Amino acid sequence: AQSVTQLGSHVSVSEGALVLLRCNYSSSVPPYLFWYVQYPNQGLQLLLKYTTGATLVKGINGFEAEFKKSETSFHLTKPSAHMSDAAEYFCAVSENTGNQFYFGTGTSLTVIP
Amino acid sequence: DSGVTQTPKHLITATGQRVTLRCSPRSGDLSVYWYQQSLDQGLQFLIQYYNGEERAKGNILERFSAQQFPDLHSELNLSSLELGDSALYFCASSAGAVNQPQHFGDGTRLSIL
């Protein structure tokens, strides 16, 4: 089975600073990769996805992520944090032959004014 | 708005009871997924249905069951409830059966007293 590791359950950045949320997965074959965001009292919203092709993926709200096969990583970045980015972020992996999504434990992002 | 509707939003009941959670997927989506989110377990995949048939099963207890009806809405039945079943239950839907981005509802918060 897949496992997804999100390093840092809590990340704090200053408004305008770079956001970097880390995600590593375990897989012997290239998986499908996703980042979701969860605002308080809401469901998860898809930020971006990687399936095949270009390894740098752009998502909504200025976020992007890069798939690095050699590092089995799919880190999420945003050049300049905004107060509205404060939320819980989840990395998810799906094997390219399977149906099941495996979610990381989430990273809570705090943006300091 | 993800297009996925979950009812009820909140449910309070007692140990030993049985409850039913309902999910209407996005228009056109054939797959429905159920997840349990708790503070200690994180986001756990329970079960997936595709076009009325069970497609994948995750960490779903025997006391829990689900089904997807011909109109594609789904119900998650939880019986013999225990205090540890208190959690946020999410439904998600996707167009296809495998590796499709999932769209989440806002969840049902279940509290067991």
Image (cartoon, helix red, strand yellow):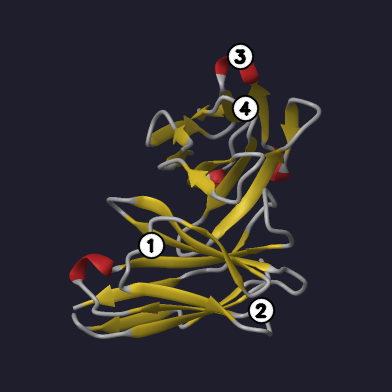
Specify the label residue B72 is tagged with. Answer: 2
Tell me the quarter of the picture where residue A45 sits.
bottom right
In this rendering, the answer to whether A75 lies above or below A97 is: above
Tag 1: residue type?
A: Ile
Q: Residue at x 47, y 31 (%)?
A: A13
- Label 3 vs label 4, nearer the camera: 4
Percent x, y of residue A89: 51, 44
Residue, x 39% and y 30% (percent of image)? A8
The residue at the point 56 percent across, 16 percent down is A71
The quadrant in which the C terminus of chain B is found is bottom left
Residue B28, horizontal then vertical, whole percent: 77, 72
Mark-to-mark CA distance, 1 and 2:
20 Å
Residue reaching furthest to the top: A70
Q: Position of residue B79 (x, y in %)?
A: 30, 80
Element assignment for label 2? loop
Asked if badges 2 and 4 are on one and the same chain, I answer no
Can the viewer see residue B41 in this picture? yes
Which element type, helix, strand or loop, lies under badge 4? loop
Task: Please give the label number shown on residue A29.
Answer: 4
Chain designation of label 1: B
Residue annotated with mark 1: B60
Q: A8 or B55: which is nearer to us?
A: B55
- Using the image, tell me which numbered label, if any, was put on residue A70: 3
Q: Which numbered disc flags the more N-terminal residue, 1 or 2?
A: 1
Q: How far apart are marks 3 and 1 (CA)?
A: 34 Å
10 Å crowding of disc 4: few (<14), some (14-19), many (20+):
few
